Image (tube, helix red, strand yellow):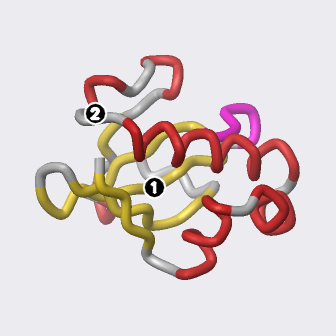
Amino acid sequence: MDVHFRTDELRECAADVNKATKAFGRAVGRKYQERVSFLMEIESTREIPSSWRFHPLRRDREGQFAIDLNKDKGVRLIMTFPKPGLLRVQEVNTDHYD
């Protein structure tokens, strides 16, 4: 899947574990990097493990999707799919809209 990033910081964190852990903390930073690397390798969202809780968001986040980065703390990776085969990483957040 072709992965784009909303910000340079998100792109840099995906490429550098030190930047990711500094930005998100050790556990979330490493998981962010693992998840994004995996997403870059897949061809379809059907390949996303169910344990990641991939799901569409609702209300003012309609059109966005989330996967868990840290379920206990409610940290999620928010993404969109502007066109088939393209995933855009929007943010890492703790807001729950679903």
Seen in the image, is 18 located left or right of residue 90?
right
Q: Residue at x 48, y 39 (%)?
A: 67
Query: What secondary structure do most residues of the magenta stretch adopt?
Result: loop
For disc 2, the neighbor class at 10 Å (few under 14, some 14 to 19, many from 20) is few
Please tell me which residue lies in front, 11 or 51. 11
Mark 2 sits on what residue? 45
The answer to whether residue 32 is magenta is no
Residue placed farthest to the top in the image? 50
Instruction: State the SS at label 1.
Output: strand
Magenta part of the chain = 69-73
Q: Nearer the viewer, mark 1 or mark 2?
A: 2
Residue visible at 86% across and 66% down?
22
Give the label on residue 37, or none. Answer: none
Query: In this rendering, would 15 be left or right of 61?
Result: right
- Residue 39 in view: yes
- Does residue 63 appear anywhere in the picture? no
Q: Nearer the viewer, residue 82 or 18?
A: 18
From the viewer's perspective, is residue 76 above or below residue 22?
above
According to the picture, the residue beneath numbered tag 1 turns out to be 78
**How far apart are the two marked residues, 1 and 2, measured between alpha carbons?**
14 Å
